[in-house]
Image (cartoon, grey):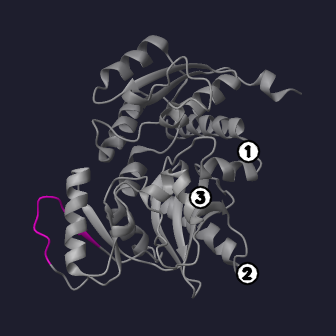
Amino acid sequence: MNRKKHRKKLRVLLLVHATLVPPEDLEDYDDERMPKYQTEFDVKHALLRLGHEVRVLGAYDDLTPIREAIEEWRPHIVFNLLEEFAGNPAFDYYVASFLEMMNIPYTGCNPRGLLLARDKALSKILLAHHHIKVPDFVVFPRGRAIRKTRRWRYPMIVKSLLQEGSVGIAQASLVNRDDQLRKRVRLIHELTRGDAIAEQYIEGRELYVTVIGNTRLQVLPFREITFPRNGNGTPIRVATHRVKWDYEYRDRWGIDYRFAHNLPKGMAERIGTLCKRAFRILDLNGYARFDLRITPEQEIYLLEANPNPAIAEFEDSAFSAHKAGLPYDQLIQRLLTLGLRYKQAVS
């Protein structure tokens, strides 16, 4: 039986940031505009290939256009690609909450899970309470004096408390002295207009683990970032913003993303169990990616939980899904199905 032929055609409202609506004439991956719209373009065209009807809606700080589109077009589901609202990543759960109030199914994580996981400090407190190892940390609220506490144990990495995608992370983010920490915290405050967090630096292998599902969870094959051995002039072993988004920089320094291999015996099972536990502790659903470090002593530290991670066709989560037997279009269809089932379960 041809499964595609008998798949129900859905009206899908693709919700994106106002500045990320793909231009109608954007078709070629060599187009210099493509990197800006990559995720939105990939998801839109996967939905079209699946036979669904798609409308793209850009949103920034006004919920009215979303309500009007839902009331007028009556989509079966919203594919939610918004990662912020009104320019603030802390408000992404507002949009999911609004979709809940509109009684419309949507892809990705529920509002409570977004709220718990986006805050790097809150998520660590919850995970540590359930005996999952996380780095020690200190939060530095914007607008308050940077006061010394006994918890400053170097080396530490200074990040935004809420921003994702390694925003504000550079080689100078790894600090070893009080003056370095204060300077970097002030920079994060200015750059993100939000709070900063300084985390204990964990030496070891860095893995990215995608989990998909609502109640029945599937852990996808692990991805790993690999660094060359440190030497004079080589970058630190941290996934900085430039490492994540500058392909030429990675090539120059021999940094690579690949599938993890040669893990110690039993480590894959331990990681899978831990990530499922974290997924449920943080009340996530749909899909999420966990960033981990494995120390030379084989301890597993959970660095971050990322609900609704990057879902472009050539991102880690999509690579992992493909290796697990879910080519990109099937992955997108799976996320639609999970969104519809979640709505049915909570109704």
- For label 1, the residue is 326
Image vertical order of residue 304 relative to residue 99, above or below = below
- Which residues, given as a range, are shown in magenta? 138-147
Q: Where is residue 254 in the image (x, y as percent from the top left)?
A: 60, 65
Extreme residue in the front direction: 232
Residue at the spot 40% in from the left edge and 41% down from the top edge: 83
Q: Which element is circle 1 on?
A: loop
Q: Quadrant of residue 261?
A: bottom right
Query: Callout 3, which amino acid?
Result: Asp
Using the image as rendered, state which of residue 100 and residue 315 is in the foreground.
315
- Quadrant of image for the N terminus: top right
Residue at the spot 39% in from the left edge and 44% down from the top edge: 111
Q: Position of residue 208 (x, y in %)?
A: 57, 62
Q: Is the magenta stretch mostly helix, strand or loop?
A: loop
Extreme residue in the top direction: 72
Q: Where is residue 173 in the image (x, y as percent from the top left)?
A: 34, 68
The circle on residue 169 is: none
Mark 2 Cα within 10 Å, few/some/many (few <14, many 20+)?
few
* First in residue order: circle 1 vs circle 3: 3
- For label 2, the residue is 265
- For label 3, the residue is 251
**Direction from residue 247 to residue 16 in the image, left or right:** left
